[in-house]
Image: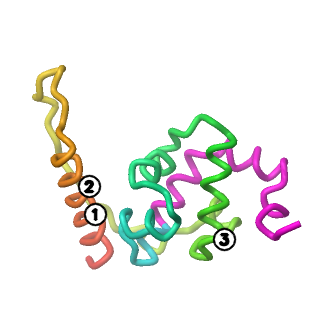
Amino acid sequence: MSIINKILEDENQEKLFESRNVVGKNVLSIIKDRGYTKSSFSKVIEVSRPTLDKIIKGDIDNKTTFITHMKKIIESNIIKYEELLNYKSLNNNCSLVTMYSDNAPSDYKRSTDTKELFMILDDLINLSEIYK
């Protein structure tokens, strides 16, 4: 049995899945603390950027899909299994405040180019937070 499968035995899978909001916050903290952007980290673990955002937000409701992504994260050797549930951020005192407006029409849809530009902007904001 591979070490990844042993680490993610049924009881550990259940614990991770039930704590997916905490796991997502820890993944984001680790990404920032280790100098990655969301885009660069998603390339390393071989998941799409939108999927990484779902992991971070705790929005993956399918246990099998979630565990598949956790295996990819652990296999990257950037994050250890233990850190997914228990991580102490290096930047506890730093926070970045952003503002936005909800004035767009309710039927407004962003174009693909606009979504891509916003992901780049989000990466720049995350990167600036690292180098405060």
Give the amino acid type for the residue marked by disc 2 in the picture: Met
Q: Is residue 21 above or below residue 23?
A: above
Decide which of 129, 66 is in the foreground and name it: 66
Give the amino acid type for the residue marked by disc 3 in the picture: Lys
Residue 119 image label:
2
Give, as a single range, the part of the protein colored magenta: 1-29
Residue 80 image label:
3
**x and y percentages locating residue 32 in the rendered image:** 41, 70
Q: Which element carries disc 3, helix, strand or loop?
A: loop
How far apart are the two marked residues, 2 and 1, measured between alpha carbons? Answer: 6 Å
- Alpha-carbon neighbours of circle 3 within 10 Å: few (<14), some, or many (≥20)? some
Give the amino acid type for the residue marked by disc 1 in the picture: Asp
The residue pinned by badge 1 equals: 123
Q: In what quadrant of the picture does the N terminus appear? A: bottom right
Mark sitting earlier along the chain (2/3) = 3
**x and y percentages locating residue 125 in the rendered image:** 24, 63
